[in-house]
Each structure stands twice: as C-alpha cells, then as structure tokens.
Image: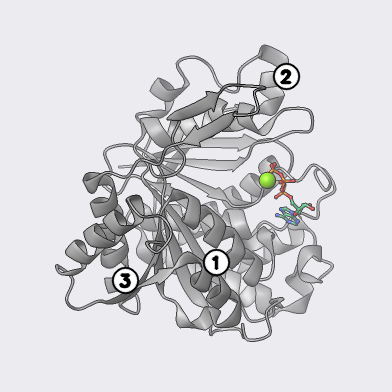
Amino acid sequence: MSQRIAVIPGDGIGAEVTDAARAVLDAVCRRHGIDLDYDEYDWSCDRYLREGTMMPTDGLAVLRPYDAILLGAVGAPGVPDHVSLWGLLIPIRRAFRQYVNLRPVRVFDGVDSPVRDARPGEVDLVVVRENVEGEYSEIGGRFDRGHPEEMAVQESVFTRAGVSRIADYAFELARTRRRHVTSATKSNGIVHTMPFWDEVVAERAAAFTDVRWRGEHIDALAAKFVLQPGSFDVVVASNLFGDILSDLAAAVAGSIGIAPSGNLDPTRTYPSMFEPVHGSAPDIAGTGVANPVGAVWSAAMMLDHLGHGAAARDVLGAIEATLREPGTRTRDLGGTAGTREVTAALVDRLDG
Ligand code: ATP
Ligand code: MG
C-alpha cells in the first residue's frame, strides 16, 4: 500500500530544493521498494500575491488525509512574515497538533563549523522544541496606548499535558540515541512557568530510569552550545527557548543550508510536516546554487517518521559521503557545485 505525501514547494529556492528531495526520495524508495504517492500544491506567497491567500480556505481539509507533508520554504520580498506564518505554517502546525519541532544538528566531515571545538563527528544533537504552547500565545495586550503609563503584557501558557508529552517525546527519543536529555529552563528568573516546567519534566523523567537527564538554565545552556556543543544528545525546550537554541545549533553546524526540521504529531493522528530550516532565499533563487541537503535530510526524517528507518539511514549515509567530497559541496560550504550536481551525487550513491 502506498503512502501519500502532500508536497508544498513554496517560494524561491523552495521549489529547487524540493525537486532535489523528490529525486533523492525516488532513488531511495526504488532501492527499498517503498511506494510513495505525491500531490503537489502551489500554496505560497506567490499565490498570496496572485489570489490574496497563501492556501485555499479548505486547505487544511485537503491536507488532512495525507501521511505527511513535505514543504520547501515560504516567504517573498514584499510579503510580511506574518502572512506566510499565519496564512500557512501556524494553521498547519496547530490543526495537525504538531506539538514537536524536531531539529537534528550534526557537524559533518567536510563542513567547517564557525566554532573551534565543534569537530566533525563530535557534534550530534537534537533539539526537541515544544511547538504549540508556551511563550508564543496570543494572550495579553497593549494598554493605555500613547500614555506615559503605556504597557504591554504577554502571557505564557504551559499545561501539564503539553509539558508532559514533549518531555515524554524527548526521553523516548533519547532511548534511541545516547540516553541523555538536557532540559532548558530559567526557573531562577521566570518564577511561575519555569518551575512548573521543571517539576513536570522531573516527574516524567522518573518513568525513564535508563535515561540520564539534567536541567540547565537557558543562558548557561546557550553558552555551552557554543563552547561544548559535543556534550549534548537530546535537548528539550519550550517554544521560545527551543526556537533560539535550534537556530544557534544550526549555525554551529556550519550552514543554514544543511539544517532540517520536522513538525511532528507523534500520535500519528494527523500528518506531520517536514521542511528545511532555511527560508526562500530570494537572493540566490533561480541561480542553481541552493544547497539541497537541508531539504534532503528533512525528507529522510519523513521516511523515518513513516516507518522507513533503513531508507532514512541510507539517505543520511549519502549526505555524509557527498559532503565529504570537496567536488560535491555547494557554495555556502565553500564548494563550487550547484544544486544539480549535489543532487546527482546523492542519487548516484543511492542507485549504486
Ligand atoms: P525567510 O524570511 O524566508 O526565512 P530569510 O532571508 O530570513 O528568509 P533565508 O531565506 O534562510 O532567510 O536566507 C538566509 C541566508 O542564507 C541568505 O543569504 C540565503 O541565500 C542563505 N541560504 C538559505 N538557504 C540556503 C541554501 N539552501 N543554500 C545556500 N544558501 C542558503
Ligand atoms: Mg527568516
């Protein structure tokens, strides 16, 4: 039986890297006898500029029956970020209860990290970001606009159910890796929500006696991401802390062009969505130099989520081998290869 994938290439280099991911998926699926069926949707800022909305009004109902969503990137000059966020990404994350944002980070052989102590092979961590509650709530407001006493209030919302399930996900993931979890906190400064976070994480940890864990304040943790990135395995964090840590970690890995992400509903009730971390990169769109690795790695995460772990590992192996060769690195990594050459090299490895 085939699995159904909704593909949303989006804007700018989104289409270029999604084509690359499709080519790699075709190769690895041939090899493993996996049957994926794709439908492509042109939902994007381009569409917004043409028709006034990022996606049709029944867009979520259209996506609902799919097994997964593969997204390129959305964003365009002249279209404010909140349009692409609130018109597409956030409705999908919320409607499909994608409460985990998963961001693996590795320093590959052949990729220079800006961080001296991040040597290839030594950095292999995953940021597990809570994706639907926490600091990014709409509760609050602006008061007494224009008055000297003007103020803004922004509430954070943490629920026992929300913290429990993200902690459980992190501990379960750690079991498949090096069995260590770091929980980002700030209970010395944020006196209600963060002590609650700590308490619930500790409660959940008790069910995973085979996994070591520690809580660490976000300020010290951020410094350690730069000073000792090799000391982390799974890092679990609230929406805001996870957002910051995952961008920081992607920078440590050497290029935003290789960073992947998954927005997951681990219960598999709804489709999960996989996308490279980078945006539409209008400055290089159409020039053929976009690094496809972030999108290809995201596709590997999708395979893993769909139950094709061996195929996912093969794609990772092809990425490692391709990055190791100077001739198949893109410009952002100091190479001269274009999207096509890198994609062809990945496909070759998987076809061979
Ligand atoms: P958005 O608002 O869509 O997130 P952005 O400008 O904030 O866009 P990106 O689109 O990710 O962020 O681009 C940031 C920089 O990184 C740009 O200079 C872009 O060319 C570069 N970049 C992003 N993705 C890639 C890629 N896959 N390969 C090479 N360079 C990339
Ligand atoms: Mg951006």
Task: Of the two numbered discs 2 and 3 on the same chain, state the one appearing first in sequence.
Answer: 2
Q: Residues within 10 Å of mark 3 (few under 14, many from 20)?
A: many
Q: Amino acid at mark 3?
A: Ala
Q: Amino acid at mark 2?
A: Leu
Task: Of the two numbered discs 1 and 3 on the same chain, state the one appearing first in sequence.
Answer: 3
Q: In the image, 288: left or right of 175?
A: right
Q: Which mark is residue 243?
A: none
Q: In the image, 160: left or right of 91?
A: left
How many angstroms separate mark 1 from mark 2 (CA)?
39 Å
Q: Is residue 201 above or below residue 233?
A: above
Please indicate, yes or no, whether residue 347 appears anywhere in the rendered image. no
Locate residue 155, reporting x and y percent.
42, 37
Dot in front, 1 or 3: 3
Q: Nearer the viewer, residue 110 or 340?
A: 110
Q: Nearer the viewer, residue 59 or 224?
A: 224
Q: Residues within 10 Å of mark 2 (few under 14, many from 20)?
A: few
Q: Quarter of the image containing the C terminus?
A: bottom right
Residue at mark 1: 350
Residue at mark 2: 49
Question: Which residue occupies the extreme front position in the image?
Answer: 148
Check if mark 1's residue and mark 3's residue have beta carbons within 8 Å.
no
